[in-house]
Amino acid sequence: MSSALSGWRRSWLVLSGARIDRRRPDLGALRAQQDPEAFLWQILPHAARTFAACIAILPPRIARAAAVGYLYCRILDTYEDLHPDPDARETALRHFAARFDAEPLGPTAAIPQAVRQDARDATHLLLVERCDLVDQVYLTLDSRQRQAVREVVTAMAEGMCWSSRVFVDQGGVLKDEAQLLRYCRNVIGNPVLFTMHLLHDDELAPELTEQAMVVGEMVQLANITRDIEKDLPRGVAYHPDLGPLLKDGSVDADIIRRVRLGFLRLALIRVPAYLRIVESIDFDRVSMARASALLMLLFTDRHYRDCARRVDLVSWSGADSWSSLLRQALPAVFSSRYTHKVLARVQRNFLSALQQEDGDE
């Protein structure tokens, strides 16, 4: 596995990320790829475009570990999303985590009669099928990174078992805010915490661990607010007011707008946690990791600007195109002052929108 080639592939991933059509993946090329490192970077943008770009511009040693950890998390997501049988789903989730108890790692469990919605699901199933290639890169990580990967996989698998049981027992509906936030922590909070472990040389203080989980809530709420209309047909509602829409199959625009506005409010009040965790990291003077952290928030900012427009709030200004977001993030490589300035601006915009929403009540 050539580190020079790996660096080239990461650069290609960043530059071409906006052009990858996840709705029409080249499954043949992904199946034909035999080089573990090449497969890692080839499939990563199909697992998640936003996270792929942020991972790709991390320093090489951290980028590889982050990519491996994220793809394993994507596999756990695939078990939760596509496994049709609840009991077999939990067994598969726990089996995947148990693979890391000893090396070499054992095979992954297949998903018989997977519930597919689109071509992206086919890519995710291929990732499960070819997990052995990701395993080969995992085994080249240092011991501290492998431990961080094991911890995130174990925590996320248990969290998803909880989520699976709750959705089954409650007819596909989360009944309150506490369940919603716990779900967000299970899905994105654990990966955020994993990334923090990769970037910190020492143990995380309990308060920083909590802030990482709050950031996970903010980021996952972006996915939830975006996908309300997509999730309802697959029998999932993240708010009790959406429950009746599952039963009769209707689409009530007023209910959806009200729920989306509530999700937006929950997300906006969490932005100060992002600044706290970024400012806790001892970045190098010249730091791609700092630019990656800024890029992640800029992607999140773009989503919530769009969400504000969808619920008839006055949106704030910001970059929209993928290339513009990258150009805005890159100066952070050289300037911590610039980074803080942009982070603070995003925070002000979020909190101003929250005040606007409060004033409209």
Image: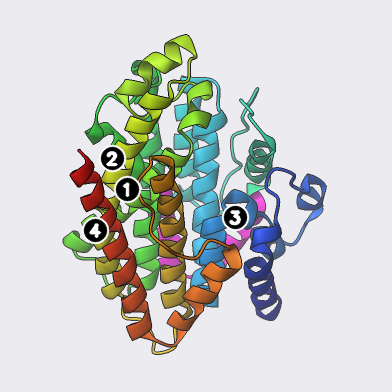
| 249 over 14 or under it: above or below | above
Circle nearer the N terminus (3, 4): 3
What whole-number distance in Å separates the C-alpha atoms at marks 3 and 4? 30 Å
Which label is found at residue 181?
2
Q: Where is residue 109 in the image (x, y as percent from the top left)?
A: 59, 34
User: The magenta stretch spans which residues?
Assistant: 132-154
The three-letter amino acid code for the residue at tag 1 is Glu
What whole-number distance in Å separates the C-alpha atoms at marks 1 and 4? 10 Å
Which label is found at residue 135?
3
Q: Can residue 84 be seen in this view?
A: yes
The three-letter amino acid code for the residue at tag 3 is Asp
* The one of 145 and 76 positioned closer to us in this rendering: 76
Q: Is residue 311 left or right of residue 70?
A: left
State the SS at label 2.
helix
Q: Do the residues labelled 2 and 1 touch (CB within 8 Å)?
A: yes
Quarter where residue 163 is shown: top left
Q: Position of residue 119 (x, y in %)?
A: 70, 37
Circle nearer the N terminus (2, 4): 2
Per the image, the residue denoted by label 1 is 217
Q: Are marks 2 and 4 in contact (CB under 8 Å)?
A: no
Which label is found at residue 211?
4
Q: Where is residue 108 in the image (x, y as percent from the top left)?
A: 59, 40
Circle nearer the N terminus (1, 4): 4
Quarter where residue 285 is shown: bottom left
Circle nearer the N terminus (1, 3): 3
Residue at the spot 40% in from the left edge and 63% down from the top edge: 297
